[in-house]
Amino acid sequence: MDYQFVLYEVRTGNIITTMSDVATEDVAEGFEGTVERLNKTQQEKVDYLCSGSFPDLSPDTHYVEGGSKVVRKSSFPKLDTSRNGVIKNIPKGTVVMWPDLQETVENTGVLELESNVSGTFEFEFRYPKYFAKIIEVEFNV
């Protein structure tokens, strides 16, 4: 029987990589070694699990819930952009790519754009349990 090994971040459930294979001790030992090395060098604690076969399993479409099961991502929650340059209702821990391609992790639920020019600015939001969301925000000086 085919299984998939899934390497993921423990805190967020974000899938780092997957490997399809027949479940063997050699593959499991390889993942255990990878987990040990990453936990010594990375800020995020990682682990792995062995799950049944998902034909379309990908970090873009799935995440690990509760450390025990692989789940399909859902739509990103609606973001409030009703105020000039302010985005609200951002889930805590969301990675935001700003228009200048800088990434931040938003933990307050709100971000505010500051600029010396008016325009339309594009932001990308990524959170492990949701599909990525790209929005455009109007800002007027």
Image (spheres, rainbow, N blue to C red):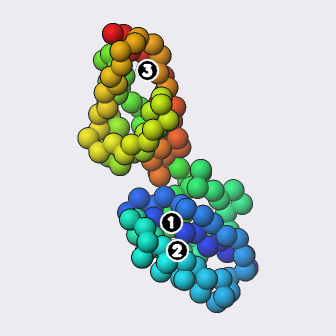
- Location of residue 77 with respect to 40 vertically, above or below: above
Query: Number of labelled discs?
Result: 3
Residue hosting label 2: 48
Query: Which mark is on residue 8?
Result: 1
Separation (CA) of disc 2 from disc 3: 38 Å
Q: Percent x, y for residue 138?
A: 42, 15
Query: Is the residue under label 3 in contact with that under label 1 (CB below 8 Å)?
Result: no
Question: Element at badge 2?
Answer: strand
- Location of residue 118 with respect to 108 vertically, above or below: above
Of labels 2 and 3, the one closer to you: 3
Query: Which mark is on residue 137?
Result: 3
Left or right: 89 in relation to 70? left
Q: Percent x, y for residue 107?
A: 29, 45
Query: Is the residue under label 2 in contact with that under label 1 (CB below 8 Å)?
Result: yes
User: Quick one: quadrant of the C terminus?
Assistant: top left
Query: Residue 12 appears in which quarter of the rendering?
Result: bottom left
Question: Element at badge 3?
Answer: strand
| Circle nearer the N terminus (2, 3) | 2
How crowded is the residue under tag 1: few (<14 C-alpha within 10 Å), some, or many (20+)?
A: many
Task: Tell me the kind of residue under disc 3.
Answer: Val
The answer, for residue 66, to whether it is visible in the render is no
**Residue visible at 53% across and 43% down in the picture:** 131
Query: Residue 30 appears in which quarter of the rendering?
Result: bottom right
Q: Percent x, y for residue 36?
A: 47, 80
Task: Tell me the kind of residue under disc 1.
Answer: Tyr
**Residue visible at 39% across and 43% down in the picture:** 104
| Circle nearer the N terminus (1, 2) | 1
How crowded is the residue under tag 3: few (<14 C-alpha within 10 Å), some, or many (20+)?
A: some
Task: Tell me the kind of residue under disc 2.
Answer: Tyr
- Location of residue 30 with respect to 115 vertically, above or below: below
